Image (cartoon, helix red, strand yellow):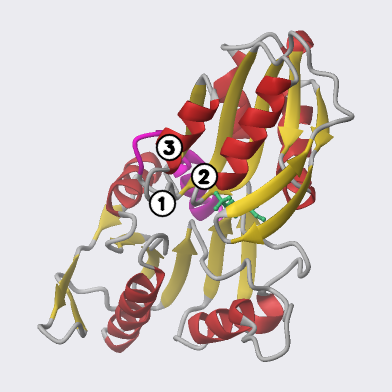
């Protein structure tokens, strides 16, 4: 298999290729003055099985178009099979029409990706809540990997599971907090969140007793940091001893990281599905293993 690094995942793609022992074919990506993107494969891929690695965080629209163009370049250059590895799959939070007149973004983006000429899509901890599987929208095989064990393993040497409580900051995060807590061998609780605006949330932790406990808050992503910062504040007020914040996708928009530390977090850590200062845990072994066993 050949690894093709998209510009949203260059270092991760390199680590995947190294872990799996695959070769890399680079892509030249340029932007025209009017914002259009140009891609060109730097080597031949005729007859090859290819995994294109492209997270689509922070600049989802640009990275999506680059992905579509690269799939086309791979197909027209004769690649035998093209697997789209999208470690951070964007637009999934709008997976329902909440108010009349809205677009169903998860469906639209999945259909575009599925129609690009790709044979299969692999992602990590996708934000799927109301819908569980994207294969209906994608029209191709869809695989979800999870970073829960990698994240839990990171904490195994840091905390004593007997003194730790895992917290899901909202109901949607229970699907990530539960396997994380199981892997760590501890309990978890779920907070009740209501979102006022994209950057304002209200969290309820009244019934929780955390005095003197070590807390690990687990979510799929940290975007503006509002959810994490509010959760940290609420748990701090309840008397938590140390608070760790962890997620698979550290998008960390603007001053998200500062806000979470300022709220009282002792450490913030995430994976490299999205490159960031806290992306200390690599999903490369997870993806490399999966690709090797395809
Ligand atoms: C929401 O449902 C997600 O699981 C995250 O809690 C949320 O997207 C994080 O966003 P922010 O960091 O902007 O609060």
Circle 1 residue: 253
Seen in the image, is 162 located left or right of residue 61?
A: right
Seen in the image, is 93 located left or right of residue 289?
A: right
User: Is residue 72 something that shows in the picture?
Assistant: yes
Query: How far from the left and from the top, in percent, is residue 178?
Result: 79, 37
Comes first in the chain, label 1 or label 2: 2
The residue carrying pointer 3 sits among few (fewer than 14), some (14 to 19) or many (20 or more) residues within 10 Å by Cα, namely: many
Query: How far from the left and from the top, in percent, is residue 202?
Result: 71, 47
| Quarter location, residue 38 | bottom left
Q: Nearer the viewer, residue 93 or 176?
A: 93
Note whether ligand 1 is within 8 Å of mark 1: yes
Q: Residue furthest right?
A: 207
Span highlighted in magenta in the image? 276-294
The residue carrying pointer 1 sits among few (fewer than 14), some (14 to 19) or many (20 or more) residues within 10 Å by Cα, namely: few
Q: Is residue 282 magenta?
A: yes
Query: How far from the left and from the top, in percent, is residue 84?
Result: 46, 69
Seen in the image, is 92 located left or right of residue 128?
A: left
Q: Secondary structure at mark 2?
A: loop
**What residue is at 47 percent from the left and 28 percent from the top?**
262
Q: Is residue 194 magenta?
A: no
- Which label was assigned to residue 215? none
**Mark 1–mark 2 distance (CA, rounded to whole Å):** 8 Å
Residues under numbered marks 1 and 2 in contact, where contact means CB atoms less than 8 Å apart? yes
Comes first in the chain, label 3 or label 2: 2
**What residue is at 69 percent from the left and 8 percent from the top?**
160
Q: Secondary structure at mark 3?
A: helix
Q: Secondary structure at mark 1?
A: loop
Circle 2 residue: 225
Residues under numbered marks 3 and 2 in contact, where contact means CB atoms less than 8 Å apart? yes
Circle 3 residue: 257
């Amino acid at each position: 298999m050949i690894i093709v690094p998209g510009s949203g995942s260059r270092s991760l793609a390199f680590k995947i290729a190294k872990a799996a022992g695959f070769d890399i074919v680079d892509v030249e990506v340029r932007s025209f003055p009017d914002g259009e993107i140009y891609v060109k494969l730097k080597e031949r891929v005729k007859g090859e099985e290819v995994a294109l690695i492209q997270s689509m965080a922070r600049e989802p629209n640009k990275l999506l178009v680059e992905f579509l163009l690269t799939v086309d370049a791979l197909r027209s250059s004769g690649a035998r099979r093209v697997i789209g590895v999208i470690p951070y799959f964007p637009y999934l939070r709008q997976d329902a029409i909440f108010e009349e007149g809205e677009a169903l973004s998860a469906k639209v983006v999945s259909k575009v990706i599925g129609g690009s000429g790709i044979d299969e899509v692999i992602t990590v901890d996708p934000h799927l809540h109301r819908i569980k599987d994207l294969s209906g929208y994608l029209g191709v095989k869809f695989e979800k990997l999870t970073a829960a064990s990698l994240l839990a393993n990171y904490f195994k040497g840091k905390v004593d599971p007997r003194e730790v409580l895992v917290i899901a900051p909202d109901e949607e995060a229970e699907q990530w907090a539960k396997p994380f807590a199981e892997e760590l061998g501890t309990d978890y609780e779920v907070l009740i969140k209501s979102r006022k605006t994209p950057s304002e949330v209200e969290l309820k932790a009244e019934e929780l007793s955390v005095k003197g406990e070590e807390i690990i808050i687990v979510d799929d992503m940290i975007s503006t940091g509002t959810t994490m910062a509010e959760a940290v504040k609420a748990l701090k007020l309840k008397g938590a001893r140390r608070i760790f914040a962890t997620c698979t996708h550290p998008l960390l928009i603007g001053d998200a990281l500062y806000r979470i530390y300022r709220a009282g977090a002792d450490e913030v850590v995430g994976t490299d599905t999205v490159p960031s200062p806290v992306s200390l845990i690599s999903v490369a072994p997870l993806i490399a293993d999966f690709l090797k066993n395809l």
